[in-house]
Image: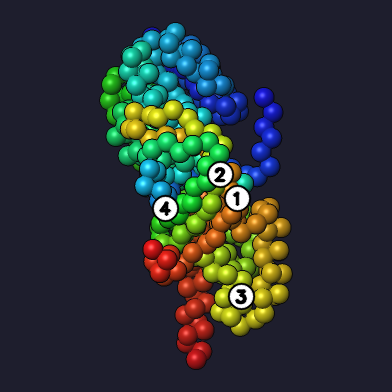
């Protein structure tokens, strides 16, 4: 029997994984941890299990790998799509999946890892599905006008309002008005949060950069 | 426990360089919000001390020709024990920040 520990503070995601695994005859969920303390107790108590955990929930990978080794536990990390898999695989985590994983791949990963093999969800497939997976980024991208996208690109590159105004051939006040609209549409409160949001949603960053490049090219052609 | 954070937190793993303090020279971000940041750094800064650091945003993260940099001044509010790789997890309140373009950051180094 393959024993599973689920460790994630997102109850809905935990329930979703549990639902997929629960119907398998040879798999049993022995613990569900929603706090770090519960996860540590489960590692100690259910030796020889496979632990599926969220990277944001247990960020100290090195310590986790050490504890897991002491208890004969194999680890499967649920990584964010912005994370680099090697970071976990080189630290000794055997399995890596993203939140976009489907049932068949999740089961494949768990079975491989329980047999001591390495399994990492294919990043290229995740990237190909980025449009479908990143609903928030895609929705924001579609709500912004080309000029707003260009301003987002310039903010992320470190331009000040005055410089953006000069590049767009307008006034600083107009740039501030645009920015206020962008903040409202995205739901952020300042330019740092805007930049972080954009970095986090690569689909938006790429659209902003592409729009900025297109506008730069067309303004270059008109001169 | 109630979460009293007022800003959205983003899981963003970016390289960073601590400025002007050889005890904690390099590291990486674990998560960032507009109000605070969690970093992994070499060395152990004191709680209450100020750190100035420069976060590098790689070109591929923003789809541009040049990388971008964010310079932050943070106050250390928590230090977590060193992990196996010798790095310390530290939580900082961001007191001030500024975006730098590549040319600007090179000029100040």
Whole-Å distance between the Cαs marked 4 and 2? 15 Å
Q: Earlier in the sequence, mark 4 or mark 1?
A: 4
- The residue nearer to you, when weighing A153 against A24, is A153
Does residue B84 appear in this view? yes
Q: Residue at x 55, y 60 (%)?
A: B98
Element marked by disc 4:
loop
Which chain letter goes with mark 2? B
Residue at 40% x, 69% y: name it. B107
Of mark 4 and mark 2, the one earlier in the sequence is 4
Circle 4 residue: B20
In the rendered image, residues at marks 3 and 1 fall on the same chain: no
Quarter in which the N terminus of chain A is drawn: top left
Give the residue pinned by disc 3: A162
Write down the residue under mark 2.
B75
Q: Chain of mark 3?
A: A
Residue A135: image x %, image y %?
A: 58, 48
Return the mark for residue B95. Answer: 1
User: Quarter of the image holding residue A9?
Assistant: top right
Are the residues flagged by discs 1 and 2 in contact, CB closer than 8 Å?
yes
Q: CA distance from mark 4 to mark 1?
A: 17 Å
């Amino acid at each position: 029997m393959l024993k599973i520990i689920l460790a994630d503070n997102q109850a809905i995601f935990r329930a979703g994984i549990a639902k997929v695994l629960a119907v398998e005859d040879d798999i049993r969920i022995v613990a569900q941890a929603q706090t770090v303390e519960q996860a540590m107790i489960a590692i100690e108590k259910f030796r020889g299990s496979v632990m599926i955990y969220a990277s944001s929930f247990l960020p100290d990978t090195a310590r986790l790998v050490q504890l897991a080794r002491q208890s004969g536990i194999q680890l499967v990390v649920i990584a964010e799509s912005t994370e680099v898999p090697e970071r976990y695989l080189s630290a000794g985590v055997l399995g890596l999946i993203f939140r976009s994983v489907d049932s068949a791949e999740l089961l494949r990963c768990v079975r491989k890892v329980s047999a001591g093999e390495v399994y990492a969800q294919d990043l290229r497939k995740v990237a190909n599905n980025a449009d479908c997976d990143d609903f928030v980024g895609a929705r924001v991208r579609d709500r912004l006008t080309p000029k707003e996208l260009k301003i987002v690109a310039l903010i992320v590159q470190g331009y000040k309002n005055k410089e953006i105004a000069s590049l767009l051939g307008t006034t600083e006040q107009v740039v501030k008005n645009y920015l206020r609209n962008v903040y409202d549409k995205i739901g952020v409160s300042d330019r740092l949060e805007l930049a972080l949001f954009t970095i986090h949603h690569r689909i938006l960053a790429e659209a902003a950069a592409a729009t900025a490049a297109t506008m730069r090219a067309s303004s270059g052609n008109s001169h | 426990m109630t979460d009293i954070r007022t800003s959205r937190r983003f899981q963003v793993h970016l390289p960073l360089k601590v400025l002007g303090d050889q005890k904690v020279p390099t590291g990486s971000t674990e998560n960032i919000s507009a109000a605070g940041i969690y970093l992994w750094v070499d060395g152990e800064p004191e709680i209450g001390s100020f750190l100035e650091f420069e976060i590098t945003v790689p070109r591929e993260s923003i789809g541009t020709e040049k990388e971008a940099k964010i310079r932050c001044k943070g106050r250390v509010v928590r230090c977590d024990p060193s992990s196996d790789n010798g790095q310390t997890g530290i939580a900082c309140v961001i007191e001030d920040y500024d975006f730098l373009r590549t040319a600007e950051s090179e000029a100040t180094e």
